[in-house]
Amino acid sequence: MMEQREISKAVINRLPRYYRYLGNLMDSGVERISSGELSRIMGVTASQIRQDLNHFGGFGQQGYGYNVQYLHGEIAKILGLDRDYDTIVIGAGRLGQAISNYVGFRNRGFRIHAVFDRNPGKYKDLINSDAKLYSTDELADYLKEHHVDIAAVTVPSEAAKVIVPVLVKGGVKGIWNFAHTDLDVPDDVQVQSVHLSESLMQLSYKINH
Amino acid sequence: MMEQREISKAVINRLPRYYRYLGNLMDSGVERISSGELSRIMGVTASQIRQDLNHFGGFGQQGYGYNVQYLHGEIAKILGLDRDYDTIVIGAGRLGQAISNYVGFRNRGFRIHAVFDRNPGKYKDLINSDAKLYSTDELADYLKEHHVDIAAVTVPSEAAKVIVPVLVKGGVKGIWNFAHTDLDVPDDVQVQSVHLSESLMQLSYKINH
DNA sequence: TAGATTGTTAATCGATTAACAATC
DNA sequence: TAGATTGTTAATCGATTAACAATC
């Protein structure tokens, strides 16, 4: 699980896409693939594929290419998909529900145990995953009693800024942030933000240029 | 609205973040800001801020800095936020609902007129925005009668691959893609993807390294 | 005017691509 | 073995940072 050396962010950001394409190839029954062929399918250079993969060690074989299943598995290990993550969701609104109920996350080891909302009664019927619904008031206590790796934060910016310190104090190590704000956390806590409105602005830029 | 020269993708991706910080500064009543001060707040170099902004022309003034409101407005123009976008949502599931009901998009000119679902009856009560709910079967006809700039695609990959050609044929110019797949569209159609599972994988990588 | 800060050029750094020797 | 394709080094390209003259 420890990395060999410092890997650039650009490389890491590409790994999930490799992982997705390799999964698709596996589903299609493809056993081996060359960087040249993968390059054609994915629309990136073969050179980049080989460079990227070699940051982590030699996964291929000269004259043969890469074994799809093996490479898929190795990338899973690099991304940390070979373990489970105790996960909670902050906010039971539509976005929180979408995340809580997306089975794909669970299948990848992100186990959503609980959903917190300021007004849990309002959503009692809507949460149909195995996750339990709690009041936000119970969050600090919950974190004392339960181990949580990841919290998905789907509440507005102001609420997020109040809740994040509680999460940090409660030992959460990864915050998946959907609030439209940057979050301030200690170095040992990781934040991954999904800024939907910024994504939409990038689309509107592209449409006009 | 035409760009002056070719602007790198890295610069464009940073503009929405500038826009957000400038909006916050406006709300706080700040009238002017120097690249040095903005650099301190945003955690990027002052050099980068000046370089980025200068791709679009001289927005600042030596010895003074930048006028916050003016700069905010200019970035809005660059991003295409000075016009409205006729928008539809494909998929009335939780994610589709989250997007349809997020007022922030509407405030920025993204007007959501319609939501399409294979099973619209199922969601009749849940869509509480001004958007009308239609069956996916009605999509092609709808596009003949209505102008649509942007479609947010929140259905699974397989459904997305079927629907995207319909959108393209119907004249949609921007696709905001939430399906876990890459989409193949003509050059004059723009795709902006939000790959949630890839974002989550990037978080799990960070947690383990 | 003097001080501050931009706009812009030059230097550095990092990432991507090309090339090819190693090797399966 | 011969052919194919990787692993890896070198070359290129692009993006970021530093520096400073221009100017408000």
Image (cartoon, coloured by chain):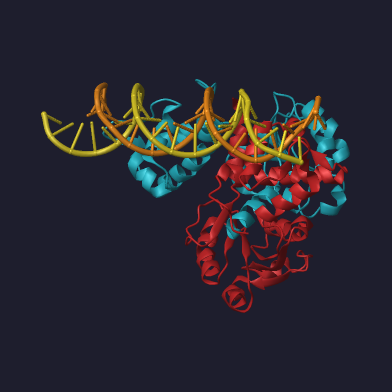
Chain colours: A red, B cyan, C yellow, D orange
Residue A167 % position (x, y)? 55, 67
Q: Quadrant of the N terminus of chain A?
A: bottom right
Q: Residue at horizontal 63%, vertical 51%?
A: B202
User: Is residue C19 found left or right of B122 in the rendered image?
Assistant: left
State which quarter of the image contains the C terminus of chain A: top right
Q: Give the residue at x 47% y 58%.
A: A184
In the image, residue B71 lies at what x, y percent?
Answer: 42, 35
Where residue B138 sits in the image (x, y, percent)? 86, 36
For the point 62% across and 55% down, the residue is: B205
The structure residue drawn at horizontal position 73% and vertical position 35%, both measured from the top left corner, is A35
In the depicted structure, whether residue B127 falls above or below residue A50? below
Residue B86 to residue A153: above or below: above
Q: Of residues A185 and A76, which is closer to you in this image? A: A76
Is residue A150 among the parts visible in the rendering? yes
Marks counted in the figure total: 0
Q: Nearer the viewer, residue B191 or B141?
A: B191
Residue B123 position in % (x across, y down): 82, 53
Q: Relative to B78, is B98 on the left or the right? A: right
Q: Looking at this view, is B105 or A97 the one in front?
A: A97
